[in-house]
Image: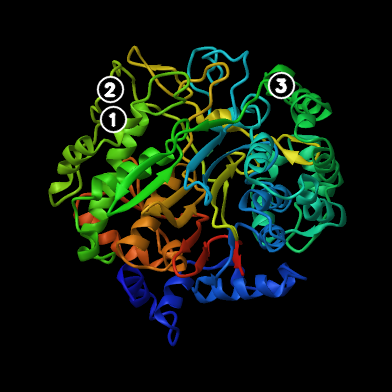
Amino acid sequence: MQGLNRVFAIAALAVLPGLPLAQQAADAVAPEAATGQDAIWPGLSDAARTALRAKAAGRPVEAQDWMIAAANPLAVEAGAKVLEQGGTAADAMVAVQAVLGLVEPQSSGLGGGAFLIWYDAATGQVTTLDGRETAPLSVTPQLFQDDAGEPLKFFDAVVGGLSVGTPGTPALLAEAQGRWGNRPWPGLFTDAIRLAESGFKVSPRLAALVAGDRDRLARFDATAGYFLPGGAPVEAGQILRNPAYAEVLKSISDQGVAVFYSGEVARDVTQVVQTAPGNPGQLSPLDLAIYRVIERDPVCVDYRGYDVCGMGPPSSGGLAVGQILGLLRPYDLAALGPENSESWRLIGDASRLAFADRGRYVADSDFLPVPIEGMVDSEYLNNRSKLLGGDDALPEVAPGDPTFDHALNWADDEAIEFPSTSHISIVDGYGNAMSMTTTIENAFGSRLMVRGFLLNNELTDFSFRTHRDGRPIANAVAPGKRPRSSMAPTIVLKDGKPVLVIGSPGGSRIIGYVAEAIIAHIDWGMDVQQAVAMGHLVNRFGTYDVEEGSPAATLAAPLEAMGYEVKARALNSGLHAIAIGEGLRGGADPRREGIAIGR
Ligand code: GLY
């Protein structure tokens, strides 16, 4: 056993006597799925039950032909069925997303947006698709400011119509499946429609989140009627039916996503946004009618002989993960090991440097010049990595000066991102690999519900201020612009072939979760389940977040001694990863309800 898992396992020994060390490390982050599974997930397939047991024991799921990992067993089963029938990863993704929108509605769905990275086995090409939401054409720079030009309080902006961007997820499903699918489109919605009509058991996670958010959910009749029937939050194990969602899926499965963007669904979505009580928004039928998925170049960075490929702007995910890894190239993390606070000084300060660049330069590159190549240029990163050469925490961190053929006179961004979102990783029987992170932004998004699905609050990923000290902020809102994201769907390749498919929810901490799991796998030799279960240490802006209740907290004191402010807190990633080698190995984050299934 290597690295931090060993240290964490040692720390956990006192409370978990007699368990294998890897299992102790995994159990130390309180796997939700380890308790009462029969009651929570009745009728699961044998494969799903095996997967739940493997996750609880801290073991990866192993397979030969295909593998799928996502945030809810019912959704994973729907995708697994498609793969079993010979469907591709793109087909399976549609089935998974359709079920996630029902059983994990707080995180992603038809009303949100997503980014997808695809490795095509036939051509060897890596493609990324941008299904991010867009700002309505009628927005002004003052969208999230009060009459005095001051930023609104976060939840005043989030809850209601103001924060709703044009959903991109339905178009992304159609685009990906149209390019890479081989199954008939209507069949991909069968499980979701059946579950929506006959009902599904509310999961403990959904029930807990509904109870915690009841005041906001209660503000809108349709939302309250679904999540708070009779005024009380739905409970874990309760059967919940969603006939409105079944109907919208039937329309999309019969008529395609045009019905969402220009038909009766578009009419209802815009009407709900524009008439939201207390906080109406501006989304119009035209915004939906002109929505387009955009193919973009992947951002790929070399890390110890691997190509780590991710999503470019408007996501900051690929650039920030790439910068963190690029800055760490000169340092021998494998020799230091994961139990060493020196490793975490290097990782934490590399992350701070990446976040400084992200805050200054990264936004929707269709609206402003972003120095994408300069930010991951080897010479730039090598020079900047010299800043990590000391012994203690960097006292100050500032953006760098990447080479670029435009003036870069931006002020730093101040968007707030709260952790929500979901991640799907799939490898199909043809060797294609897909990593997709999908979101409605905050848990339950804008809290507005229409036709059985929630609408996003993605526009609050823009900076609420447009300027600072007279200089413009790159991630300011503009008509048609896509808000900067942190989503980091990632495929790692070796010699042109995929070896790791990974991603996570978690707001701007996504970047740290993904970078650390890649380091754990590549430098510290952890298998995918160990890598996703490892206790988190994340530093974005100076404060070192360490995962409370996990063995990672044992590093708090040495990090404080290096000069970091340290905060122990829950760090609810939702990493789903597949390693591709002799066979396939799948890992599902023990902090959430997901599993990996393979054959
Ligand atoms: N709303 C979360 C993200 O896009 O990063």
Horizontally, is 548 left or right of 373 in the view?
Answer: right
**Contact? badges 2 and 3 (CB < 8 Å):** no
Vertical relation: 462 (above or below) 501: above
Q: Position of residue 515 (x, y in %)?
A: 37, 51
> Closest to the observer: 239 or 310?
310
Report whether residue 146 is seen: yes
Which quarter of the figure is the N terminus placed in?
Answer: bottom left
The residue at which mark 1 appears reads as 374
Neighbor class of circle 2 (other Cα within 10 Å; few <14, some 14-19, many 20+) is some
> Closest to the observer: 92 or 525?
92
**Residue labelled 3 has its Cβ within 8 Å of some atom of ligand 1:** no
**Contact? badges 1 and 2 (CB < 8 Å):** yes
**How far apart are the two marked residues, 2 and 3, measured between alpha carbons?**
35 Å
Three-letter amino acid code of the residue under disc 1: Gly
The residue at which mark 3 appears reads as 289
Residue at screen point 56% across, 18% down:
143
Three-letter amino acid code of the residue under disc 3: Ala
The residue at which mark 2 appears reads as 404
Which quarter of the figure is the C terminus placed in?
Answer: bottom right
Residue at screen point 37% across, 68% down:
526
| Residue at the farthest bottom position | 18
Mark 2 or 3, nearer chain start: 3
